[in-house]
Image (spheres, rainbow, N blue to C red):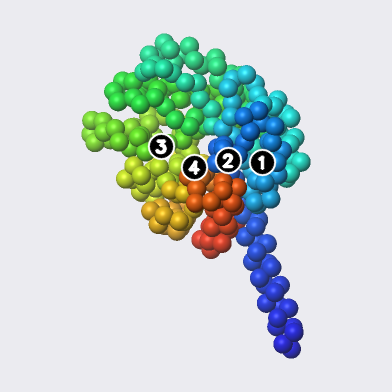
Amino acid sequence: MKKILILLCAMTLAAVHTNAAEKNIGLQMYSLRTEIAKDFSNIDTIIAAIAKAGYKYVETANYSGDGKIYGMEPAVFAEKLRAHGLHALSCHVQKRFKKTPTRAELDEALPWWDKCIADHKAAGMKYVIMPSMPRLTKVEDIQAFCEYLNKIGDKCNAAGLKFGYHNHAFEFETKLPGKLTKYEYMLQNTDPGKVFFEMDVYWTVMGRFSPVELFKKYPGRFLVLHIKDQKELGQSGMVGFEAIFKNIGASGAKYLIVEVEKYNMPPIESVTASLKYLNDAPYVKADYSK
């Protein structure tokens, strides 16, 4: 009887571990930027490490407009991921401006997105995401940028993809008339059918805003979440992950992406520990995409 009980306990623990390992969570590859060789010669090793850690997909952060993703043709990159049971869900890409862009300059930048969208579609991605924006402070400039985002969203929709915007803390620092932050202005002045928001929960908290309150105020706008902390997930105590996940239903989130920018340990170990934190958290569902 004792042996049977031990066996049953072992089977139960194995089942819990298996279920945890099956959580549908991705990694922003920027987390491993210091590990990736400048000539991308070790990209196979990096991809293998991401898969071994237990991640199911990646978000890229390397595109210069030349058609290459980590030095490879999009289809080649996609095949390398598939070989390790991974896929690319999304990308961080941006057409940069040296100063506050005029409406004319924003329109002139639109053709750049055509190739960008085509390249990332060729890599099998679902989402194209702008990771930041110019530090605009005037309402008219922010409004022009919102219209620019809508136009990029139109292009993504036409290609069968979706377009999103990823925040930092500065979008919460600019106070517009009516005490509205830049981030909320963008939420209110972009078309939900054209632009979603990839909320970075850490930067939102650093901007002194509650992710949960924003979920409830703008339900369904946050299709992807960047799950992030000061270093490894759960180490700082500054981000209320349990509250975020217990209220995630209002956000509209389908996918979770871990990003780590600072580390208490080597980056590969750091991203592995961060995934384990989510896998072990009982309040994090196995899959939000279904």
Query: The residue under label 2 is which amino acid type?
Result: Leu
Residue 50 vertical position relative to residue 37 in the rendered view, above or below: below
Q: Residue at x 67, y 72 (%)?
A: 12
Q: State the image coordinates of residue 283 (x, y, percent, origin top left).
A: 51, 61
Query: The residue under label 4 is which amino acid type?
Result: Glu
**SS for dot 4:** loop
- Could you give the CA–CA distance between mark 3 and mark 1, rounded to whole angstroms? 26 Å
Residue at image mark 4: 261
Q: Nearer the viewer, residue 278 or 178?
A: 278
Residue 137 vertical position relative to residue 231 in the rendered view, above or below: above
**Which badge, 4 or 1, is on the more N-terminal residue?**
1
Residue at image mark 2: 32
Residue at image mark 1: 46
Nearer to us of marks 3 and 4 is: 4
* Contact flag, marks 4 and 1 (Cβ < 8 Å): no
Does residue 68 appear in the picture of this structure? yes
Residues packed near mark 3 inside 10 Å, few (<14), some (14 to 19) or many (20 plus): some
Query: The residue under label 3 is which amino acid type?
Result: His
**Which badge, 2 or 1, is on the more N-terminal residue?**
2
Q: Residue at x 53, y 61 (%)?
A: 281
Q: Classify residue 209 as left or right of residue 271.
A: left
**Which badge, 3 or 1, is on the more N-terminal residue?**
1
* Contact flag, marks 2 and 1 (Cβ < 8 Å): yes
Q: State the image coordinates of residue 227 (x, y, percent, origin top left).
A: 49, 47
- Could you give the CA–CA distance between mark 3 and mark 4, rounded to whole angstroms? 13 Å
* Contact flag, marks 3 and 4 (Cβ < 8 Å): no
- Could you give the CA–CA distance between mark 4 and mark 2, rounded to whole angstroms? 8 Å
**SS for dot 1:** helix
Q: Nearer the viewer, residue 34 or 173?
A: 34
Query: The residue under label 1 is which amino acid type?
Result: Ile
Residues packed near mark 1 inside 10 Å, few (<14), some (14 to 19) or many (20 plus): some
Mark carried by residue 168:
3
